[in-house]
Amino acid sequence: MENRESKYLRAKERVNELKKFYGNLTSYIFVISLLAVINYLTNEWRYMWFLWAAFGWGIGLFFHAFRTFGWNPFFSRDWEDRKIQEFMEQDDKSKSRWE
């Protein structure tokens, strides 16, 4: 029962991460589009200043996607699970030596 519950909690956490990312992506598209329209209306692309905001926010969005979709080969969810298991086994071994 505990294993099923922990799987449910991990899945729920994953869904929340995805919702946050897609919310961020939607906001990015909406706000950058609005800034582009304002930029066009004010100076007709003579200086495309909205690209600075798109670039800055885009970097943050890229790292958010990187974390959300587990593209990090060094600290992925599998790596975390393996390390947790390793530390739990080490803890069990150290307890058994003292008992």
Image (cartoon, grey):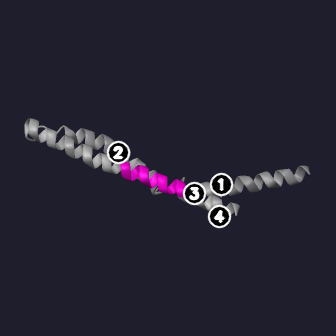
Disc 1 element: helix
Residue 72 locus on image (x, y percent): 48, 54
Q: Which mark is residue 59?
A: 2
Front label number (4 vs 2): 4
Residue 87 locus on image (x, y percent): 71, 52
Mark closest to the chain's N terminus, 3 or 2:
3
Q: Please identify the residue farthest to the right as the structure is shown.
A: 99
Q: Which mark is residue 83?
A: 1
Disc 1 residue type (three-letter): Lys
Disc 2 element: helix
Front label number (3 vs 2): 3
Please give the name of the residue rendered at 76% of the width and 56% of the height, measured from the top-left corner: 89
Asked if labels 1 and 4 touch by Cβ distance under 8 angstroms, the answer is no
User: What distance separates the C-alpha of mark 2 from that of mark 1?
Assistant: 29 Å
Disc 4 element: helix
Q: Which mark is residue 4?
A: 4
Residue 98 locus on image (x, y percent): 90, 49
The answer, for residue 46, to whether it is visible in the render is no
User: What distance separates the C-alpha of mark 4 from that of mark 3?
Assistant: 10 Å
Mark closest to the chain's N terminus, 4 or 1:
4
Q: Main secondary structure of the magenta part?
A: helix
Residue 32, compared with residue 68, is above or below; it is above
Figure quadrant of the N terminus? bottom right
Q: Is disc 4 surrounded by few (<14), some (14 to 19) or many (20+) residues within 10 Å?
A: few
Front label number (4 vs 3): 4
Residue at mark 3: 10
Q: Is disc 1 surrounded by few (<14), some (14 to 19) or many (20+) residues within 10 Å?
A: few
Left or right of 37 on screen, residue 93:
right
Disc 3 residue type (three-letter): Arg
Residue 71 locus on image (x, y percent): 46, 57
Disc 2 residue type (three-letter): Ile
